Image (cartoon, rainbow, N blue to C red):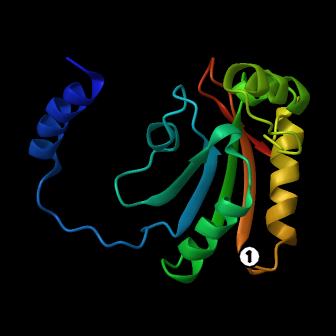
Amino acid sequence: MSYFEHFLAANQAYVELHGTALLPAKPKMRVAIVTCMDSRLHVAQALGLALGDAHILRNAGGRVTDDMIRSLVISQQQMGTREIVVLHHTDCGAQTFTNASFTEQIQHQLSLDVSGCDFLPFTDVIQSVKDDMAILKGSPLIPADVVINGAVYDVTTGQMTAVD
């Protein structure tokens, strides 16, 4: 059985628990969370979120990219969110490479020249949160009255620590 077949079977059990309540498209808490795709971070459970509470936007490293800003603008302007949480985590895969080493790896494995691409690696998780918060605060697409907070999630303990 492929994982996809397993997912379809698991989804059937989920459907039975889901019920037929119609949730609004707009997140109840009016918050968007920018975080990493890491499988050790279950955002809803870690933050006590229920279905329909928040937008959860994920990418490698949880970095604020142009596409993340595009999603945040839609989240705010179409769905009414008024708060952003940047949530990075310890032991992130984005801390395990540099642009130079990853570019070389891609050249070797895929025979593609990706020199000049920024894969947004980082070494200091707290600084990465601060950098991404600064990008959001400096973006003309994010209104000044939108609340922006940041935190680091510890994948070993599950503890979330605020970053100023």
Q: Say which element carries label 1.
A: loop
Q: Position of residue 134 (x, y in %)?
A: 87, 60
Q: Is residue 153 left or right of residue 119?
A: left
Q: Is residue 28 left or right of residue 86?
A: left
Which residue is drawn at the image coordinates 70% and 38% (left, top)? 61
Q: Residues within 10 Å of mark 1 (few under 14, many from 20)?
A: many
- The picture quadrant where one finds residue 75 is bottom right
Q: Position of residue 59 (x, y in %)?
A: 62, 44
> In the rendered structure, which amino acid carries the disc numbered 1?
Ile
What residue would you read off at disc 1? 142
| On-image quarter of the N terminus | top left
**Of 8 and 126, which appears nearest the observer?**
8
- Considering only vertical position in the picture, is 65 above or below 30? above
**Of 65 and 34, which appears nearest the observer?**
65
**Of 39 and 156, which appears nearest the observer?**
39
- The picture quadrant where one finds residue 142 is bottom right
Q: Is residue 109 left or right of residue 138?
A: left
